[in-house]
Amino acid sequence: MTKRLVFIHGRAQQDQDSLAMKAEWVQLFQNGLQSAGLTMPIAETDIKFPYYGDTLDDLVTGADQVAEVIVRGIGASQAEKDFVRAVLEEVLKRTNITPEELDAIIGAEVVQRGPLNWEWVQGILKAIDQHVPLSSGASIAIATNDVYQYLCNAAIANQINDGVMKAMQPGVPTVVVAHSLGTVVAYNLLKNKGSALGWEVPLFVTVGSPLAVTKIKQMITPIGHPACVKKWFNAMDERDIVALYPLSKKYFQVTPQIENKTDVQNPTENRHGISGYLGDSEVARRIHAALI
């Protein structure tokens, strides 16, 4: 039986041509295969690329308005603010930003009022911009908000889920490769629906995944290894502060344990971007082995 490959993309993909995006991902995968001395093991027609970028953008009300809500804190619910704040404070702890550097950016008055005021969050965003190379505080905040919207807004989750589910076929061995927000979507569906729908996943590959971030992990509990998944391989660039942690026993304890690769070296200016992940020879080799 011919196996299939499903790519599940992350955020910031609105207003994109889905066919062009698929072609880009396929090319990146081919680059990784070439670096491993391998060739494409299946036909491109057996590669599926469910696209939900416009759906997410439309339902969240548009990128400009999202930036207004997140960066300025205008119009966001308290629950949404609390979620974004908690994730950003965890990101801050994983950086090399010193308390003195943060105080200088935020200002003594804001520090005195404490972390529950939104100026504190804005200060974290500025600190990331200034002190974490090739990272954008606003991009991290908006990515965090997208995860929140998917986990807490049924309309968004249902539309995204419906599109991804159409790419899966019962009884057909399918390798699933997911990036960023896509790892949250894929994990949710594989764990909660995969077995009931007859999905067979010989390999689940997550790259740049934020699943182990504390606030996100709390919202998807109980965590577990999807029953329909035979093996789970996770890859991250340790400089990727959206992923933040490997999906290791310490941070994301499931049985059987997830195999982690933490030495991906993304050569692009975006440590979280898909290019460096799919172009990694070991990531490509794992996908190839599961498809033959």
Image: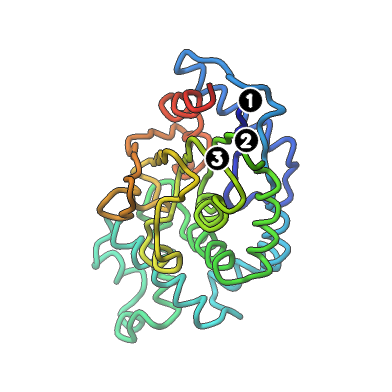
| x, y percent for residue 208 | 45, 46
Picture quadrant where residue 128 is located: bottom left
Q: Amino acid at mark 2?
A: Val
> For residue 200, which numbered disc appears in the image?
3
Q: How far is mark 3 from mark 1, CA to CA?
A: 13 Å
Q: Are marks 3 and 2 in contact (CB under 8 Å)?
A: yes
Residue that mark 2 sits on: 172
In the displayed structure, does residue 70 sit left or right of residue 130? right
Asked whether 136 or 173 is in front, the reply is 173
As drawn, the label of residue 2 is 1
Is residue 91 depicted above or below 103 in this figure? above
Instruction: Name the amino acid, label 3.
Output: Glu
Which of the marked residues, 3 or 1, is nearer the chain's N terminus?
1
The residue tagged with tag 3: helix, strand or loop?
A: loop
Q: Quadrant of residue 27?
A: top right
Circle 2 sits in a helix, a strand or a loop, which is it? loop
